Image (spheres, grey):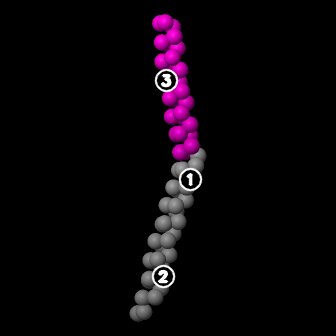
Amino acid sequence: MKHFTKGFLFGVVATASAVAGAVFSFKKKVVQPIEDQEARFEENRKKANRKSHSAHHGY
């Protein structure tokens, strides 16, 4: 029974670490590039808005 308990606990830990690794990998490969792209779009939107307002200042 002692070996079964050790094996079971090792399996639980190994499975949990595999799931955590998969989630981390998914975040780095899929979610992070999307967030970076959205940040670039937002920065470009802010720049364009400032440029538009300064071009139509009317002085």
Query: Separation of disc 3 and disc 1 at Cα?
Result: 30 Å
User: Given the image, on which type of amino acid does mark 3 rest?
Assistant: Val
User: Given the image, on which type of amino acid does mark 2 rest?
Assistant: Ser
The x, y position of residue 14, in whole percent, is 53, 24
- List the residue tagged with mark 2: 52
- List the residue tagged with mark 3: 13
Identified at 58% across, 46% down, the residue is 29
Q: Image quarter for residue 59?
A: bottom left
The magenta region covers: 1-28
Q: Please rate how many residues cluster around mark 2, counting C-alpha atoms within 10 Å: few if below 14, some from 14 to 19, many from 20.
A: few
Magenta stretch holds residue 24? yes
First-in-chain label (3 vs 1): 3
Q: Please rate how many residues cluster around mark 1, counting C-alpha atoms within 10 Å: few if below 14, some from 14 to 19, many from 20.
A: few
- List the residue tagged with mark 1: 33
Identified at 48% across, 66% down, the residue is 43
Of 50 and 2, the residue lying toward us: 2
Q: Image quarter for residue 21?
A: top right
First-in-chain label (3 vs 2): 3
Identified at 51% across, 34% down, the residue is 20
